[in-house]
Image: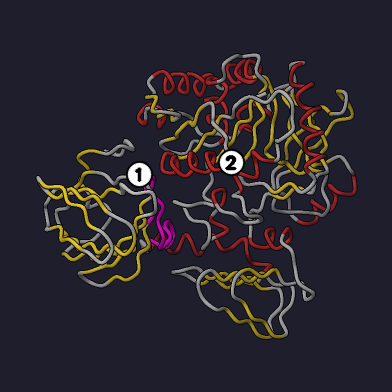
Amino acid sequence: MIPVILSGGSGTRLWPLSRRHYPKQFLPLVSNHTMIQETLLRLSGIAGLKAPIAVCNEDHRFMMAEQLREIDITPNAIILEPLGRNTAPAVALAALTAASEDDVLLILPADHVIEDVAAFQHAVSQAKDLAEQGFLVTFGIVPTEPETGYGYIKRSTENAGPAYKVASFVEKPNLETAESYLRTGDYYWNSGMFAFKASCFLSELQKFNPAMLDTCQQALKSAQIDMDFVRLDKEIFASCPSDSIDYAVMEKTDKAVVIPMDAAWNDVGSWSALWDVTEKDASGNAIMGDVFTVDTRNSFIHAHSKLVTVVGLSDVIVVETDDAIMVAAKVRVQDVKEIVDQLKAQGRVEADIHRKAYRPWGHYDLVDTGERHQTKRIVVKPGAKLSLQKHHHRAEHWVVVKGTALITKGDEQILISENESTYIPLGVVHCLENPGVIPLEIVEVQSGSYLGEDDIIRLNDQYGRV
């Protein structure tokens, strides 16, 4: 069985922590591990697992590789989507990448919380047996309340061992309809998790959406293999129909079955959902960071870099990051995405990126910015190297505060250490490298008429970003 990790979401409802360039699946929201790491770690102990296949946005490739490395997992492949095309093409790509068409694929979104791991693993074992018999298995979460934020799966009366034949997939209901679903006992929350043989899924996809399958085959055939990365052809993949597994296959096939699963599952799709699964104090508050409260109850308060105080409020969400503060009534957290839409409409970078930006070589923190200058704190991992590059509109001044820097500047190479500095004039080809065994930290002061990140002309890059 091959775990397939789907990591294409942007998690806008968890803004300002989750953003397009660093979405929720890469964040440690409920433990010291990130959501992606938790997704794989909860598979520990299941017999017969092969190396996983991950499908992610091309912009997230190095975060994915690094987070897998941190938990000692070497993937079968990391498939890079140049643009999002929903879950059905992502699963098709994984099925086509599998070593054998008889392999069972375990499809797992990368942003779920599952507290009862034993119950989850038991359901996976049942699903594997059914998948080997040719069924397309989905996991239906036994509902605990009339949730209006999830789609539902209705079971039929016909069963297949521990599973039921799927009668229908149902869109997110209103409250009255959701309450009626609970009363019948025939409906489950749609988890978005699946298990099936690669050959069975591809056969059904060929039947119901041959254009999608053909495009995925072409995109893979033209893909470039770069270490563990499979880089799809952007032009070909852009022509692929966009659809979910549910719409493309599961709603149409007669082989769909649902396994009921009661494993304390949560898809952490909103701040209130995160409050549900986070440890709380005696007043019902989930608190993270440097927080003081007075007469505050049933709230989620997250402080990242500043002291946050809350007085006399109940059922609120307060989230502070380096560059944004979000305050919302807990019952209105689904509307956080409207804030993100407004930010995007006004071209605000806070919609997409954090003040601290991660790169394959390390990260930088935008400390200060003005009309013609900005200051960054740059951290380069041992042995890592930035691209050989130049700028048309800015000059840079580097001061080493920790470690040693090997700097290419024009035709010369220089080595500078703590409390030493160098100046990179506008237009000069340059490169920054950490030849040491400890992280290199420098302060970079940029000055010029334009300071955007797109003013980087890469001439050579070991991470394939030229």
Callout 2: helix, strand or loop?
A: loop
Tag shown at residue 383 = 1
Callout 1: helix, strand or loop?
A: loop
In the picture, which quadrant includes the C terminus? top left
> Quick check: is 385 in the magenta stretch?
no
Q: Which residues are magenta?
A: 349-363
Q: What kind of residue is marked 2?
A: Ile
Q: Nearer the viewer, mark 2 or mark 1?
A: 1
Question: Which residue lies under the disc numbered 2?
Answer: 71
The location of residue 436, given as percent across then percent down, is 34, 49
Q: Residues within 10 Å of mark 2 (few under 14, many from 20)?
A: few
Is 283 left, or right, of 326 in this rendering?
A: right
Q: In the image shown, does 315 or 415 lie closer to the viewer?
A: 415
The location of residue 374, given as percent across then percent down, is 26, 67
**Residue under the image location 62 percent in, 40 percent down:** 109
Name the outermost residue toward the left.
411
Relative vertical location of residue 349 with respect to residue 68 in this rendering, above or below: below
Q: In the image shown, does 275 or 144 lie closer to the viewer?
A: 275
The location of residue 209, given as percent across then percent down, is 56, 22
Is 56 left, or right, of 236 in this rendering?
A: right
